[in-house]
Amino acid sequence: MLSRVADALFWMSRYLERAEHVARLLDVCFHLEVDLRGVASDPHVQNWTCIATILQQPVPPACDASLQAAIGESFTFDLTNPGSVMSCLSRARLNARSIRDVISSEVWRELNTLYLQLLDPDFISRARESPHDFYQAVETGSYALQGACDATMNHDVGWQFIQLGKYLERADKTLRTVDIQYHRLQQLHEPADLPLSNVQWAAVLRSCRAYEAHRRRYAGRLDPEHVVDFLLLNPDFPRSVRFCLEAAERALTAIEGAARGTGLSRPGRLLGRVVGELRFCEIDQVLADDLHGFLGGVLDRCGQIGRALNEQYSLR
């Protein structure tokens, strides 16, 4: 496969996953502020600035607007912000348009329909007043596009690059969410903090669309250790770090098998090592030692994998 095509497929998928995650974080925070009224005196500043930390972006100046409005505008609509929902979707669409002959017409239609819906002036006007419908449209459109990829494209090398981009991006965002939120919420350990703790940890799970799946496995209180274990090491939940990196490893193995026949490349070896570490990881030991250091190490290795993929396959 041409490196230009592989690059476009990889980044189309990665930008779409990024847009979905940003939209979900903003939507969860929007509803969390409502849930925390009466539970905490001034919760919104930490919650909204936490989003900027997870997304590795500076907090935009509020000026005459509230902090919520400033972050919502910058991270949703601002095309000059490369991490905003609309910027990510625009880049995903540009990549898809450059390979129209590779992706199916259904995939292009789903992406184009979502993009044009979100550009509609009336829809944007309503979204600025009540953004939930906008964020839901992004999530629903992303699910539809992923389904179209799976149902209408050959599961060949091109499709594997789509999976590789999606799962590497998803693992990165789950890692950053767990890392930032666990250490921010560690202080909520007193009995009087239980209502606030439950609301906040439920929001962490919803940020990864894991709330219902987690509750099916762990009934009762939202224990922070269980949340971390579920989002980091669960082998069956499709947004856990372990699941995502195992899926990325399968995609890369299929790509390398088609391109090389035998033997692992450097990105394959790096990915295999971090997957093996997660498979045999004991969460109690990690929490007792240094969770932040452990997650930082996994994030660093994911960065190394991305750079190695760039060298191997000329991905940006």
Image (cartoon, helix red, strand yellow):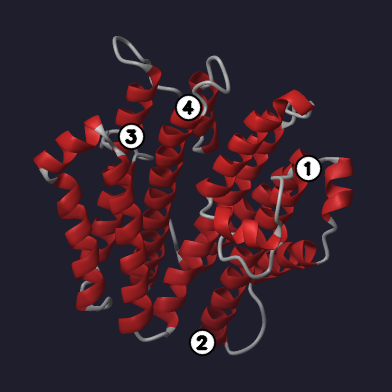
Residue that carries the numbered disc 4 in the rendered image? 48
Q: Is residue 5 visible?
A: yes
Residue that carries the numbered disc 3 in the rendered image? 81
Q: Residues within 10 Å of mark 3 (few under 14, many from 20)?
A: some
Residue 44: x and y, percent? 49, 22
Mark 1: amino acid: Leu
Q: Residues within 10 Å of mark 2 (few under 14, many from 20)?
A: few
N-term mark: 4 or 1: 4
Asked whether the residues under the numbered discs 4 and 3 touch, taking CB atoms below 8 Å apart as contact, a structural biologist would say no
From the viewer's perspective, is 290 left or right of 90? right
Q: Is residue 4 visible?
A: no
Q: Residues within 10 Å of mark 4 (few under 14, many from 20)?
A: many
From the viewer's perspective, is 252 left or right of 281? left
Tell me: residue 152, above or below residue 173.
Answer: below
N-term mark: 2 or 1: 2
Asked whether the residues under the numbered discs 2 and 1 touch, taking CB atoms below 8 Å apart as contact, a structural biologist would say no
User: Does dot 4 land on a helix, a strand or a loop?
Assistant: helix
Tell me: residue 259, above or below residue 69.
Answer: below
Tell me: residue 206, above or below residue 162.
Answer: above
User: Does dot 1 land on a helix, a strand or a loop?
Assistant: helix
User: Does dot 2 land on a helix, a strand or a loop?
Assistant: helix
Residue that carries the numbered disc 1 in the rendered image? 291
Mark 4: amino acid: Trp
Q: Quadrant of residue 30?
A: top left
In the rendered image, the residue lying farthest to the top is: 64
N-term mark: 4 or 2: 4
